[in-house]
Image: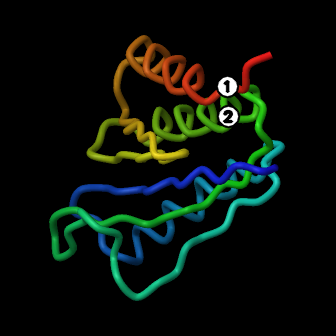
Amino acid sequence: MDTELRLQISEEGADAERLAALASYLRMDLLQLNADDVASVRDGEPPPGTRVGGRTAASVLIVTLGQSAASLRWVLSAIKGWLRRSGAGRRQVLLELAGDALALTPASAADQERLTEVFVSRHAIPG
């Protein structure tokens, strides 16, 4: 059974067009991995908790993965690399998987690594 990982991309001060472009760039990076699918979510309402109008807005991708921890690690590594390449900024990717959430920002590599290891360990299939 496949797993769906929801990615909510946000950037302070970004408009809908900018967020669509950011989501497209991240989607291209993720499609180079072994993800089964990376789909853009398109609906008329912004996701709950997002603000539009010069503050913070978001764009959403759904990544379909197998159930291996390696697949999840590859996706997290790609997201961290994408955030690092974005330079300093107020960009964030909120990951949601099976009711668990992790917010990644252009934080230090050590902080990101520690947080992603905890996230992966919570979703790894035993055995």
Residue 122, image quadrant: top right
Q: Which residue is mark 1?
A: 124
Badge number at residue 82: none
Q: Which residue is mark 2?
A: 72
Pointers 2 and 1 in contact (CB under 8 A)?
yes
How many C-alpha atoms fall within 10 Å of the one at disc 1: few (<14), some, or many (≥20)? few
CA–CA distance in space, label 2 to label 1: 9 Å
The quadrant of the image that shows the C terminus is: top right
Q: Is residue 74 left or right of residue 19?
A: right
Residue 62, image quadrant: bottom right
Residue 75 at x, y = what percent?
Answer: 66, 38
Residue type highlighted by circle 2: Leu
Camera-nearest residue between 121 and 81 = 121
Identify the element where label 2 is drawn. Answer: helix
Residue type highlighted by circle 1: Ala
Identify the element where label 1 is drawn. Answer: loop
Q: Is residue 72 left or right of residue 95?
A: right
